[in-house]
Amino acid sequence: MAGLSFEFFPPKTEAAEANLWSAVERLAPLKPDFVSVTYGAGGSTRDRTHACLRKLIEETSLTPAAHLTCVAASKDDVDSVIDAYQAAGIRHIVALRGDMPDMGAFAAHADGYSGSVELVEAIAARGGFEISVSAYPEKHPESKSIEQDIDLLKAKIDAGASRAITQFAFDTQVFLRYRDALLKANIDIPILPGIMPTTNFKGARRMASLCGASVPDSLIAKYDGLEDDLAARKIVAAEVAAEQCKTLLDEGFNDIHFYTLNQADLAFDVCTELGLGAKR
Ligand code: FAD
C-alpha cells in the first residue's frame, strides 16, 4: 500500500489550534506513516512546534516528525532542540537549513551549522533519529541548476538522510522528470512528492512564485472564474490533487506527502478517492 504523510504547522491562535486538532483527528484514521510539524522561519515557532509535537505524542497514536532549521541559531541552540526532541520521544527529524528571518541571502550564524548538510551530520552523530531532508524538483530559488540541487541532496544523503520530501509542485511532469534525474544520479532513497491541495488558488500561486514552483496554464484555466465560488474551487482542488497522486503512484512513486495547511477535508477526500491510507 502507498505510504502517506501529512504536514501541519503550529497554530498561533486558539481558533487555529482548534482547527489543527480537528484536522489531525479527521486524518488520523488514515494511519499515515508520519505527520510532520514545521519549525517557523528562523526558529520563530520553536516552543509552539514543540508543544504541538508533545501533544501528538501524548494524545494520539500518530508518529510525529519534527522539522528543525539551523538558520539564525548557534550549534548549541540547535543541539538543545535536538536533545529536547529526543527527550520528548521524537525519533524522526526533517532537517533543513531554513531561510533568513528577513528572507535575504543566507549567511550561517557565526557559531552555527553551515547548512543542511552539517545539520544532518550533527543529528546523525547524536543517533536515534530517522532523518528526512528537503528536495526541490524545480530547483531551489537560490540554486544555480537542478544538478547543483541534486549534488546537495546527495551530500545530505551521505551525511545520514534516508528520505527526501519535495517542495510542492502543481505540474506532475515536474515530479516525473525529477525522478528520472535522481535515478540517473543513482539516488535511491524514498522521495516523497509534496502535494498541496488548496481552495485558496490565489494564495497558492503567490506561494508558488516565492518558492519557484511553476503553475501550469491548464491549472490556471481550471480555476478561472471560480474566484467567488468556494464549493467549485473545492471540487477542482480535490480533482487536481487526486489526478496528481494517481499519476505519481502509477508512475512508481510509493509515497505521497500532503501539505495540509492544517485543513483536513481536501487531503481526506483525495486519500479516500484513491484508497490511500487505512480508511477506504
Ligand atoms: P538546502 O537543501 O540545504 O539548500 C537549498 C539551496 O541552497 C540549494 O539548492 C543550494 O542552491 C543552496 N546551497 C545550500 N548549501 C550550499 C552549498 N554548500 N553550496 C552551494 N549551494 C548551497 N522552512 C522553515 O523555516 N521551516 C520548516 O519547517 C520548513 N519545512 C520545509 C519542509 C520541506 C519538505 C521543504 C521542501 C522546505 C521546508 N522549508 C522550511 C523551507 C526551507 O527552509 C527553505 O526552502 C530554505 O531556503 C532551504 O532550506 P533547505 O534545507 O531546504 O536547503
Image (tube, grey):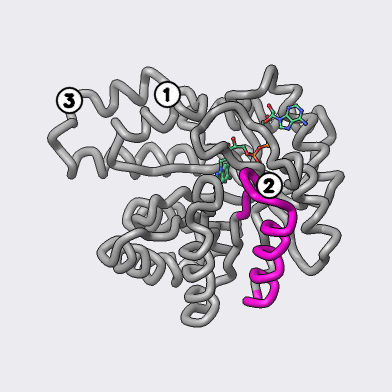
Figure quarter occupied by ligand 1: top right
Q: Nearer the viewer, residue 168 or 12?
A: 12
Q: Secondary structure at mark 3?
A: loop
The amino acid sitting under disc 3 is Gly
The amino acid beneath tag 1 is Val
Q: Secondary structure at mark 1?
A: loop
What quarter of the picture does the N terminus occupy? bottom right
- Tell me: residue 96, above or below residue 107: below
Residue 5 horizontal/vertical position (percent): 54, 57
Return the residue nearer the eye: 238 or 60: 60
The numbered mark at residue 215 is 1
Q: Identify the mark at residue 133; answer none if there is no mark.
A: 2
| CB of mark 2 near ligand 1 (< 8 Å) | yes
Q: Are marks 3 and 1 in contact (CB under 8 Å)?
A: no
> Residue 264: image x %, image y %?
35, 58
Q: Which comes before the other along the chain, label 2 or label 1?
A: 2
Mark 1 C-beta to ligand 1 under 8 Å: no
Task: Decide: few, some or many residues near mark 1? Use Cα within 10 Å; few <14, some 14-19, many ≥20.
Answer: some
Q: Quadrant of the C terminus?
A: bottom left
The reply to whether callout 3 and callout 2 are in contact (CB within 8 Å) is no
Q: Is residue 176 above or below residue 265?
A: above
Tell me the element at label 2.
strand
Residue plotted at (60% across, 61% down): 66
Q: Is residue 79 magenta?
A: yes
Q: Are marks 2 and 1 in contact (CB under 8 Å)?
A: no
